Image (tube, helix red, strand yellow):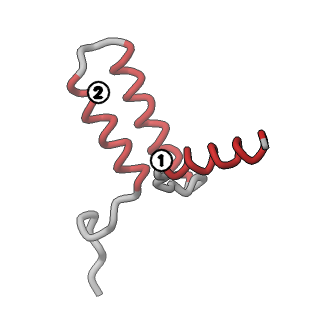
Amino acid sequence: MFKKSSFDMEVSPLRRHAADALRRARKLPVGHARNDLRQLAAGLLWLERRDSVTARVVDVATHLEKLEGVAQTSLA
């Protein structure tokens, strides 16, 4: 039937993160910080194309709680 357009497909977290990095880079003056964000975006898009990473959204607070729990049990 119809081919799905790019608007119909869900955007991957890697692609969304790369787009955010590029948006932030555009707001910066020419220099190291801007280049770093552009390289980060290029790397994220490379990873997405290679399908070598499954991106997950990690809740930092939950992750820290788990780490603190492990540290407390190892000290006991």
Residue sticking out furthest to the front: 76
Residue 63 x %, y %: 55, 49
At 30% from the left and 40% from the top, the residue drawn is 20
Residue 42 x %, y %: 43, 36
Pick the residue in front: 38 or 66.
Answer: 66
The numbered disc on residue 61 is 1
Q: Is residue 66 left or right of residue 5?
A: right
Q: What is the tally of numbered marks visible in this picture?
A: 2
Q: Which element is circle 2 on?
A: helix
The label nearer to you, 2 versus 1, is: 1
At 56% from the left and 52% from the top, the residue drawn is 50
The numbered disc on residue 25 is 2
At 48% from the left and 46% from the top, the residue drawn is 60
**Amino acid, disc 1:** Ala
Q: Which element is circle 1 on?
A: helix
Within 10 angstroms of label 1, few (less than 14), some, or many (20 or more) residues?
Answer: few
Rounded to the nearest angstrom, the CA distance separating label 2 from label 1 is 28 Å
At 41% from the left and 54% from the top, the residue drawn is 13
